[in-house]
Amino acid sequence: MVSSIIVHGGAKTISKDKARANTAGCMAAVQAGWSILTGGGNAKDAVEAAIRVLEDNPTFNASIGATLDSDGEVFLDAAIMEGKTYGWGGVAAVQKVRHPISVARKIMENKSMLLVSKGAEQFAAERGDEMCAPSELISDEQRREWEEQEAVLDRPATVGCVALDDNGLLVAGTSTGGLANQPPGRVGDSALVGCGLYADNNLGACSTTGDGESIIPVVLAKTAIDFLVENRHPQQAAQMAIDKLASQVKGEAGCILLDHQGQVGWAYNSQDMAVAYMTAKMDKIAVFTKK
């Protein structure tokens, strides 16, 4: 077993002018999480820290820079799960929360549940999470694209992280701003255990990205974990999960995966996918925008 961390900035189409921002953002997220793992911290802290970096970066569709729905508003979803006790926490359709992954983490530490909308925002405010006005989550670029109804080449997508610490704890987290021009009230896969994320210390942990309406019916994260049986390498398991999705439903998706030994896997059927990872066996961070 080796300490490992992997992040994704979404399965999407990455334009040439956004490639550097995607790789830099994913590397920064890995660095944040890796510094915690190598400093004796646990996988829960590492996943939260990495995703907070991605939520702070308008390159990605999570918190700052999230996509606008058909009414021109932003709603955020996030969840986190750990593989020892199967504890989890999730939030959905929140507007006034700066870091939804941190709220999900507090929910997990309190009692596993999914909180939505004003109830989730009230929970966050009562526990001292960073709050904000909904308008603070909307970048100038996202507002302009929504107002002009532009066909965006670099489609925003969900972000996520999976980490394994020295004690063998596996944790997965996912955060998103949803789909561009989604109908008000729509919630995708990111906050749903088994779909947008899953963690099991005996097998592995997974975070997914892509079209939630395609990910949910195939329970993509749990499906990828199930493919790890018989010591199958996570790269093979990840590809098998994406192949199963593609054979059963229409839609683009991707997943990142660690097994209980810290081996890395990732796969997607979109044009590109921003990914970065680091393990104790590596000298430097590996980062990609496509295979």
Image (cartoon, grey):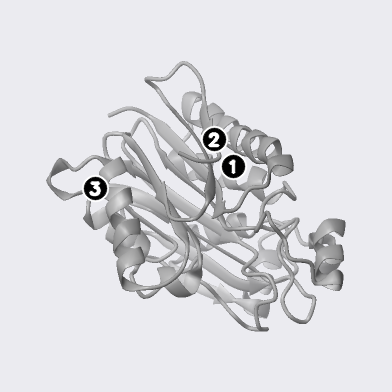
| Crowd class of label 2 (few under 14; some 14 to 19; many from 20; radius 10 Å) | many
**Which residue is found at the position 68% from the left and 54% from the top?**
154
Q: Are marks 1 and 2 in contact (CB under 8 Å)?
A: yes
Against 260, residue 187 (above or below) is below
Q: Secondary structure at mark 1?
A: helix
Q: Closer to the camera, 29 or 110?
A: 29
- Which part of the image, by quadrant, shows the N terminus? top left
The residue nearer to you, when weighing 169 against 12, is 12
Q: Quadrant of residue 30?
A: top right
CA separation in Å, label 1 and label 2: 6 Å
Vertical arrangement, residue 146 with respect to residue 38, above or below: below
Residue under pointer 2: 33
Q: Which residue is denoted by mark 3 in the rendering?
A: 203
Whichever of callouts 3 and 1 sits on the residue coming sooner in the sequence is 1
Which secondary structure, mark 2?
Answer: helix
Q: Is residue 84 visible?
A: no
How many numbered marks are there? 3
What is the three-letter code of the residue carrying label 3? Answer: Leu
Q: Residue furthest top?
A: 283
Q: Position of residue 19 (x, y in %)?
A: 66, 39
Residue depicted at 62% across the width and 68% down the height: 178
Circle number at residue 174:
none
Residue marked by disc 1: 49
- Mark 2 or mark 3: whose residue is earlier in sequence: 2
**Image side of residue 35 versus residue 71, left or right:** left
Q: Which percent across, then down, holds residue 122?
A: 68, 73
Kindly report the distance in space between the C-alpha atoms of the residues bearing marks 3 and 1: 23 Å
Secondary structure at numbered mark 3: loop
Q: Is 264 positioned to the left or the right of 33 in the image?
A: left
Q: If the image is split into quadrants, where does the C terminus sit?
A: top left
Mark 3 crowdedness (10 Å alpha carbons): few <14, some 14-19, many ≥20:
many
Query: Mark 2: which amino acid?
Result: Gly
